[in-house]
Image (cartoon, rainbow, N blue to C red):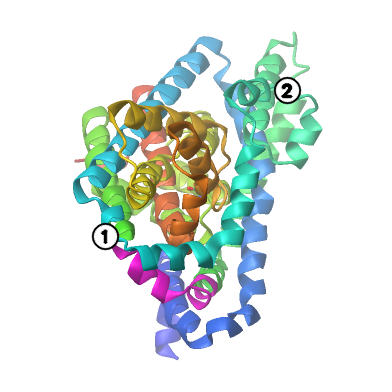
Amino acid sequence: MRIFKKLLDTQLHTKILFGLLAGIPAGLILGPRVDLIEPVGDIFLRLIRMIVVPLVFSSLFVGTASLGDIRKLSRIGAKTIGYYLCTTAIAISIGLILGNIFTPGNSIDEATKEKLMASQKTVAAEKIDIAANKPDIIDTIVHIVPGNPIESLVEANMLQIIFFAILLGIASTMIPGNKGKPLINFFESLSEAMMKTVHIVMKIAPLGVFALIAVVVGKFGADILISLLKYSIIVIVGLGIHVFLTYFTAIRLFSDVNPIEFMKKIRPAQLIAFSTSSSNATLPVTIECCEENLGISENVSSFVLPLGATINMDGTALYQGVAAIFIAQVYGIGLGFTDQLTIVLMATLASIGAAGVPGIGIITLAMVLETIGVPLEGIALILGVDRLLDMCRTVVNITGDCSCALIIGNSENELRTTPDMKE
Ligand code: ASP
């Protein structure tokens, strides 16, 4: 009883971690019967997804309206996009370098290749089909402008929502007199209420995370993991290198916040990202961690974070670098410098148009493979471990978004640090 009471008193991220760790044995014990608790995870996921659209729209609208300065907004926009593009290019380069040094694909023999291909053939064909129907980069840019903003909200199209919220925010400050004020007040109130909803939903996060992890573990085939162990370890080590080298260095250089403290403050968001494999679904928690724990203003976080959930996927890009090299090696295709440069470019561009939802990385990978002439069916080789790696890369994706919000917040004087966060 006392342990139970103590548990209730502990901090939220400790409780979520506890739920996550407890989910592993539960998944192993339940195996396929894990279906029984799947609805609990689904309910939690739907609860946080429910918050995304109203929260992003209202807080970005209020952020833009209260900034009231288009020049500042474009400066923040340029810095954000610059940071996202640079870190993504670094991430893919790390993936490519590791793939070239450790050659994970060379250790796969013909029998393992056949086994892996056979087990995932149909799923791979479905993904290739989706990739073939994806819009190209020009289409993606054209479709940032919503034809109908209500449709954008209904479909949770993040780039269109961002576009419309910013435009409406700017327009509302340009109305003469006080006529724009009621609209701003309304959305201000909505955004506060949505933040409170995040608090309420987070109360059941430990249970939701427990169920989500148990389901992943229960349905996971360990034999596949063993044949793809070297490849998986390279991706995970690469992700670690990117966090500790790229983000820690950027935070050290461009702010006076201690990177370890930064990691502690965003831990709840990282745990939710790990268990949901979705930057989009994690968005409400990411925004909450950045505003309340790191002290980044709404002006900055409401813009940088939703944009990051859609266009910044460093973890995904790094994984694509390793995966492309891995598949090419299994097929005995040598990739020259130009091919690898094409991977950097394609993976950066592909991450812009892809929403932060589970498994999108493998679909954009198919687009990358196509441009360098590696057989698309090759994605069947790595599908077996994709969910596990998706969980890890989503953590890196949202960590990158938060590091950007911190650095931009600091450079724009929109960051309220507490003494415990300093170096
Ligand atoms: N699940 C990742 C995210 O939401 C995207 C991916 O790598 O598939 O950020």
Query: Which residue in the protein does label 1 denote?
Result: 107
Task: Locate residue 60: give its quadrant.
Answer: top right
Residue 141 in magenta? no
Instruction: Specify start and end residues of the magenta stretch as a single range.
Output: 214-230
Image quarter hosting the N terminus: bottom left
Mark sitting on residue 181: 2
Type of amino acid under label 2? Lys
Q: Nearer the viewer, residue 395 or 189?
A: 395
N-term mark: 1 or 2: 1
User: Of 320 and 256, which appears nearest the observer?
Assistant: 320
Residue drawn at point x = 45 percent, y = 30 percent: 346
Give the x, y percent position of residue 409. Answer: 39, 29
Of helix, strand and loop, which mostly describes the magenta segment?
A: helix
Which quadrant of the structure image shows residue 252? top left
Q: Quadrant of the C terminus?
A: top left
Q: Nearer the viewer, mark 1 or mark 2?
A: 1
- Distance between the Cα atoms at labels 1 and 2? 64 Å
